[in-house]
Amino acid sequence: MQALRHTLLFIVTAFILTLFTKCNSSIATDQKVEQTALNLAENIDSSSLNLLKRFCYGKRGNLDGWQRVSLDSFLYTFSYRLSGDTTEMIVFRPHNFARDFTTAYLFDTTKYYQFKFSKVRDTIVRISASASQTNEIGSDTSIPVKQIFPNQSPFDTLTTLTNIKDKYSFVGSFYRGDIGDFIVFWLTPQHKLTYLPDTLKMNEKFKRNWIDEFLKGKMVKQHWSLQKVDVK
């Protein structure tokens, strides 16, 4: 159990830190970032914003990682990776995940902490489980996605989220409903775009700090502030 707690802490910390890790590619120019910010602010729709209040984004290696958030807690993480014609979905904290995505698969969390589903078109072709980062077991299958996830496919949700992320070119997103009804988009490791639609829907304990932070940025549109931050 102690080892599992350390593993959970490592995964959560790694996910959060990826938002602030310097990329190998060169930092985009401020002008280009401002164009990206303006495109996001002017075009993102309310449906996408509402979805991003449920799922925060951060990249871990070559995985697109999405955290399901609720107030001050994260409920589960599922990651998305394309490998040739195969789509891989990796699930962490599966019991919480199963509350959103009803599944016929039985997660054995007494032995494993992470589960991977590999899909080709509409068929799950392999299911794997991990007891540690170096210990994975799996078996080949040929089961329709609909049979394992009869009500809603998490692959569809991941596709929708990834399409939003790709369309608006952000490398991270952050939402905490217990702090306030605003979303932070990281456009690069040095540039963040904050959407703050209503200052009345903010926790009074944090309100002054966040408003001050918001006002430091450049207003690309009403309720949207772009800020460049120092990365040590």
Image (tube, rainbow, N blue to C red):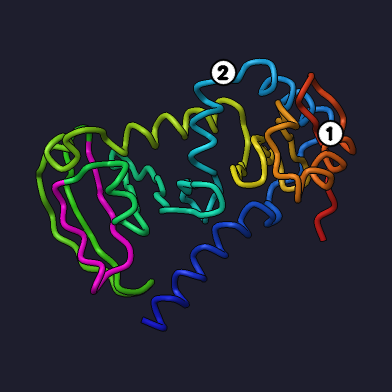
- Numbered disc 1: secondary structure: helix
The quadrant holding residue 53 is top right
Q: In the rendered image of this protein, does residue 179 appear above or below residue 140?
A: above
Q: In the rendered image of this protein, does residue 221 appear above or below residue 169?
A: above
The residue tagged 1 is: 30
Dot 1: few (<14), some (14–19), or many (≥20) neighbours within 10 Å? few
Q: Amino acid at mark 1?
A: Asp
Viewer-side label of 2, 1? 2
The residue tagged 2 is: 45
Can residue 201 be seen? yes
Q: Amino acid at mark 2?
A: Asp
Residue nearest the viewer, comparing 67 with 133? 67
**Residue numbers of the magenta segment:** 104-120
Examine the structure image and report whether residue 107 is included in the region drawn in magenta: yes
Q: In the rendered image of this protein, does residue 52 appear above or below residue 148?
A: above
The quadrant holding residue 219 is top right
| Quadrant the N terminus occupies | bottom left
Q: Tell me: 84 left or right of 48.
A: left
Dot 2: few (<14), some (14–19), or many (≥20) neighbours within 10 Å? few
Q: Tell me: 110 left or right of 23.
A: left
Q: Position of residue 112 (x, y in %)?
A: 27, 69
Residue nearest the viewer, comparing 193 with 138? 193
Residue nearest the viewer, comparing 162 with 140? 162
**Residue in the image at 82% along x and 37% along y:** 214
**Residue in the image at 61% along x and 41% along y:** 173
Q: Tell me: 212 left or right of 25.
A: right
| Quadrant the C terminus occupies | bottom right
**Residue in the image at 54% along x and 50% along y:** 59
Examine the structure image and report whether residue 151 is included in the region drawn in magenta: no
Q: Position of residue 33 (x, y in %)?
A: 77, 31
- Numbered disc 2: secondary structure: loop
Rendered image: mark on residue 223? none
